[in-house]
Amino acid sequence: MRKTTLATAMVVLGVFTAACGSDENEPEAETTPDAAAPETEAAEETETEAPDYPVEDLLIGLPAPNQVYSAVYVALDQGWFEEESFNADVVITQSSTASVQQAASASVHVGAATPDAAVFGINEGANVTIMAKTIEGSPLTVVARPDVTDWEDLHDATIGVSALKGGEIALLRRLLEENGLGDGDYDVIVSGATPGKAAALAEGSVAAAVLFSPTDFALQAEGFTILGSTAELPLAEQIPLTVYVINNEWAAENDRGDRLARVFVRANQWLADPANRDEAVEIFAAAADQQPEHVAATYELWFDQFDIGTPDGLVTAEEIQNTLEMMAADGDVSEPLPDPAEFFDPTFIENAVNELGTSD
């Protein structure tokens, strides 16, 4: 465990003689026990240890090994989970809904999900709280078959999505509308998380699909067409792509929520530092079996082109409010809208930032 060392106060008292300018006839000052007490107490101060937490398992549920979860993979590589006494491991849940459900049942301790899936679950009584986000915006890429070269080619075509409601399809509809396609101009079909949607696209069962990076760049290298990104939309800047939810009872014991938050903040600060970019590419490429050039292109997209990397993972009330309004438009929550504070707890990340400091 990390130790916090308190500097021991050392007070050196010099006894000067008449040669140093003292009046040789002046009696030496008596040292009383009371006067010496502060010095004695200071000398006895020793280093203070942080609480010694028992090592315990930490299961992290991710819908898929997507690059948006880089903080998890970086923290695993750097040993930061271990420093907080966590024996961490990743469990693939296949979907955001499953991540929320498994976190609520404590099958996993922390789960990654789209913010609408998290809000919907909490609104339905799931015993979880949103504690952090993965990225500032929502960069989803629309990738099409090689024969689809323009948005107009998607007329009467089928597009693969992960769910028929929620942030992904809401952003997709906005992007399609911006490019001249209305609701009746195309069909959508649920094809699963990014790996499932990519497989459907490769098999030809869909004409296009909404994908996470770096899968989009990998398919582009094989001849598929990147039509555009939801990151081009103003709304995408206001809703996180994915968030982390924690089981409330689990987080409340042994400072687990605070310890986990410190890991996320350290990882996000490390990722935001350009000096770590090459190492970050190596870490995720190896963890997810991706080509390094595609991983590098994704980081460049997020941090350089769109500037949507998060310095710490802090979720804001405005982001939850925007999520609620988007869900209300789809009929997934009723008006009047609930208070955003019911769905997230920013204090975990805030405390970690206060303890660790902000990145430069």
Image (cartoon, rainbow, N blue to C red):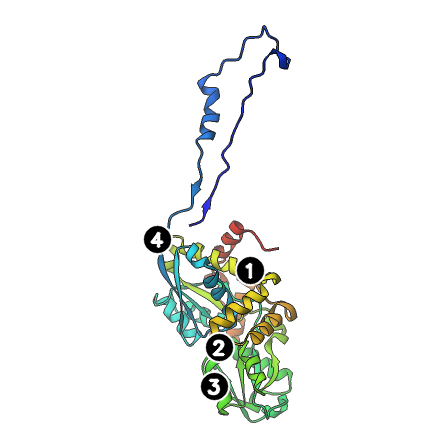
Q: Residue furthest front?
A: 19
* Residue for point 44% across, 36% down: 46
Q: Earlier in the sequence, mark 3 or mark 1?
A: 3
Mark 3 or mark 2: whose residue is earlier in sequence: 3
Cα separation between marks 1 and 2? 39 Å
Give coordinates of residue 332: x percent, y percent. 47, 75
Question: Mark 2: few, some, or many residues within 10 Å (few <14, many ≥20)?
Answer: few
Q: Nearer the viewer, residue 208 or 128?
A: 208
Residue nearer the viewer, 275 or 135: 275
Question: Which residue, given by chain and number where applicable, does mark 3 sit on?
Answer: 199
Q: Is residue 334 visible?
A: no
In the structure shown, which secondary structural element does the residue marked by tag 2 occupy?
Answer: loop
Q: Nearer the viewer, residue 45 or 181?
A: 45
Badge 1 is on which residue? 270
Q: Earlier in the sequence, mark 4 or mark 3?
A: 4
Marks 3/2 in contact by CB < 8 Å: the verdict is no
Residue 139 lies, in percent from the top left, at 58, 74
Question: Tag on residue 331?
Answer: 2
Foreground disc of the pair 3, 2: 3
The CA distance from mark 3 to mark 1 is 33 Å
Disc 4 or disc 2, which is closer to the eye?
Answer: 4
Mark 1, secondary structure of its residue: helix
Amino acid type, label 4: Pro
* Quadrant in the picture for the C terminus: bottom right
Amino acid at the residue labelled 3: Ala
The residues tagged by marks 4 and 2 sit, at their Cα atoms, a distance apart of 45 Å
Q: Which residue is mark 4?
A: 54
The picture places residue 128, in percent across and down from the top left corner, at: 40, 64
